[in-house]
């Protein structure tokens, strides 16, 4: 895996904050899911254009190497949307790297669903204390008080809505089963099992939530 060959050298001077945040998010995900340490995501970051949202560009080079670029907007203090976009980009990067290492495929819906869960995990884990009320507030802000950029009838819009709904159901179950009872060790174990599931199993668990 290597950086996108088109990456402009020197274009990341204003990504200092974003690179530090991205590296912290990556290490948090790797620790939680007990993953082997991957290439550092901060080497793959690119600045998004004005008004552009997070995106991850992936292509296979002629020599078989996978080239990745993670495009993220600038994140200002108190900017939850920008931070969520950065977490999403890092989540995609880590998931793709882990699937490539394990020689497993990953669908776009699978990536989006895992990223939705990862936003909850990262933001909840960053709180000084975490209880069921804080969990419910965070879950509502991530999955219920949202606006979608793409129309519901579009493929992309439908994919984001499905991922959002399933993540909300799954997280609500985590909240009721584990957070409310402070069973955080057991919750981490379930999160690790969910992470390693393929798309169909993830969808089934999400619907059961």
Image: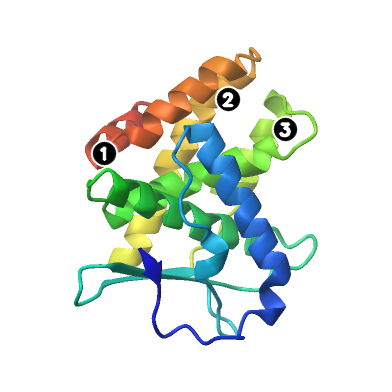
Q: Secondary structure at mark 3?
A: helix
Of label 2 and label 1, which has the lower sequence position? 2
Q: Residues within 10 Å of mark 1 (few under 14, many from 20)?
A: some
Residue denoted by label 2: 175
Residue 100, above or below 79: above
Residue denoted by label 3: 134
Quarter occupied by residue 150: bottom left
Quarter occupied by residue 2: bottom left
Picture quarter with the N terminus: bottom left
Check whether the beta carbons of the residues at disc 2 and disc 3 lie within 8 A of each other. no
Quarter occupied by residue 126: top right
Q: Residue at x 68, y 24 (%)?
A: 132
The spot of residue 90 in percent (x, y) is 51, 56
Q: Residues within 10 Å of mark 3 (few under 14, many from 20)?
A: some
Residue 163, above or below 51: above
The spot of residue 33 in percent (x, y) is 48, 34
Q: Residue at x 48, y 32 (%)?
A: 34
Question: In front here: 14 or 89?
Answer: 14
**Separation (CA) of disc 2 from disc 3:** 10 Å
Of label 1 and label 3, which has the lower sequence position? 3
Q: Secondary structure at mark 1?
A: loop
Residue 171, above or below 120: above
């Amino acid at each position: 895996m290597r950086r996108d060959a088109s990456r402009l050298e020197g274009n990341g001077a204003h990504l200092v904050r974003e690179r530090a945040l991205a590296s912290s998010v990556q290490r948090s995900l790797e620790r939680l899911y007990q993953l082997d340490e991957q290439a550092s995501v901060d080497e793959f970051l690119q600045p998004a254009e004005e008004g552009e949202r997070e995106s991850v560009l992936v292509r296979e080079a002629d020599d078989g190497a996978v080239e990745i670029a993670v495009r993220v907007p600038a994140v200002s203090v108190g900017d939850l949307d920008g931070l969520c976009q950065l977490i999403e980009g890092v989540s995609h990067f880590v998931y793709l790297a882990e699937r490539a290492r394990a020689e497993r495929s990953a669908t776009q819906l699978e990536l989006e669903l895992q990223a939705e869960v990862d936003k909850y995990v990262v933001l909840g884990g960053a709180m000084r204390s975490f209880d069921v009320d804080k969990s419910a507030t965070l879950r509502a802000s991530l999955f219920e008080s949202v606006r979608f950029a793409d129309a519901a009838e579009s493929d992309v819009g439908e994919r984001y809505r499905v991922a959002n709904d399933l993540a909300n159901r799954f997280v609500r179950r985590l909240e009721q089963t584990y957070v409310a009872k402070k069973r955080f060790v057991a919750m981490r174990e379930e999160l690790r099992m969910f992470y390693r599931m393929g798309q169909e199993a993830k969808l089934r668990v999400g619907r059961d939530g």
